[in-house]
Amino acid sequence: MKKLFITLLVLLQVVATPLLVVAQTTPAVLYFSPPGESASTGTVNINSASEFSVDVKVNTHGSNSAGADVIVTYDTTKLQYVSGSMPGSGSGSFYPTVVKGAPASNTTGRISMARVIQAPDEGSSPVYTNGDGVFANLVFKPLASSPVGTTVNLSFDYTAGSTTDCNVAGTTTSNPDILGNAKNATLTIQQGPSPTVLDSVSIAPASSTVAPSGTQALTATAKDSTGATISSGVTFAWTITGVGSLGSTSGSSVTYTAGSSTGSASVGVTATQSSVTKTGTATVTVSSTPSNDPVIDRIAPSEGEDTGTVEIVLYGNNFGTANGRVYVGGRQADISSWGNTQVVIIVPKLNATRNTEYLVRLVTDAGKEAVYMGYLAKTGLPLLPWLLMFPMNGAAALWVKRRWLAKR
């Protein structure tokens, strides 16, 4: 796009309303984020799809602007242009109420885009913008010739005084282009975080007993190699062999319904994440005299800081109505409330030196036991260093503690 287009726009604005000419002390700047206006080099992370994005930004340094033309160039032997987008119109956009020329690329490695504030109706005041904001977002994909560690260049087509390259429109006929600098970027491709990969799937409860025509809720949990639960991107398919039926064959939870006859059923689940599949099984026994042994189906929350103050709920059956005892990692917990299907406890201080999973053991008033593996105790900031830091700078100590806990 040519500066003539921007100049004509400025003339239209001048006709609509006379402008107060304000001297510009710092010229406008075009730059990429990353790395940012104050840097010329940076890094980008690639995800599992090998794509990364950068923002094209403009800083008018306090001067009013009515729009901009931007041309970005890139090396087609290292990068593939995937897509581009621009912030929507409205108060949240750097150029509100605009005519947009969306990013368009060609085979020579040039991406052209434009944003121009519409000229006001005759007699109305013009609308301008100033400050530092996002002009557009561009998404690239490294080619096979650009593995991790490769440096790539993103540049603006800008030459001072040129009429056919990047420009930022001013608001006066004496200064129609306020762009004074365009900061190119050299980026180094770095590997992004490894995607969460399915490693196992289990069904809770793993074994249960129901009466004829009774029901039992079954829940599948997918985990990665670290034991962390995968909450999205996994599908579940259920099967059953033996007596009874399932209310559904998909989803993370299903309901087993027993028939009128006794027997047993083997319930299976297959978890799938992309090309990875894992299986888990559970056994349901149908008995006319169901066991009254206690069973812990699940606990919530299943993890917490090792402070000795975290409250959790044990869900299950046959806990009885009189208080029994609960142990976490062999340490007895304080009981907040006790019911036949729910017990609320305060997790005791476990003195964990690292994030550790502990066995939860429930003993009823009648002496019957149920176990559940496990509760994850998460370590926090060591107490002594924090106490030593607090008298010197309480605010800094609290900030460090929050940052520490945020990383656990």
Image (cartoon, rainbow, N blue to C red):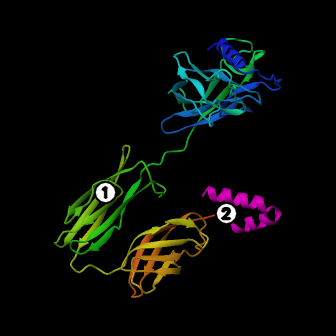
- Front-lying residue, 320 or 384: 320
Q: Quadrant of the C terminus?
A: bottom right
Q: Position of residue 216 (x, y in %)?
A: 30, 68
Say if mark 2 contacts mark 1, CB within 8 Å: no
Q: Earlier in the sequence, mark 2 or mark 1?
A: 1
- Front-lying residue, 381 or 219: 219
Q: Secondary structure at mark 1?
A: strand
Q: Does residue 169 appear left or right of residue 271 in this picture? A: right
Characterize the local packing of mark 1: few (<14), some (14-19) or many (20 or more) Cα atoms within 10 angstroms: many
Residue 207, quarter of picture: bottom left
Q: Does residue 290 appear left or right of residue 399 in this picture? A: left
Which residue appears farthest toward the left when viewing the image?
261
Is 298 magenta? The answer is: no
Q: Which residues are magenta?
A: 381-408
Which numbered disc covers residue 269?
1
On the image, numbered disc 2 is attached to which residue? 381
Confirm whether residue 234 shows in the render.
yes
Q: Position of residue 8 (x, y in %)?
A: 67, 13
- What's under tag 2, amino acid-wise? Leu
Q: Position of residue 329 (x, y in %)?
A: 51, 74
Is 406 magenta? The answer is: yes
- What's under tag 1, amino acid-wise? Val
Characterize the local packing of mark 2: few (<14), some (14-19) or many (20 or more) Cα atoms within 10 angstroms: some
Identify whether 216 is placed above or below 175. below
Which numbered disc covers residue 195?
none
Q: Position of residue 350 (x, y in %)?
A: 58, 73
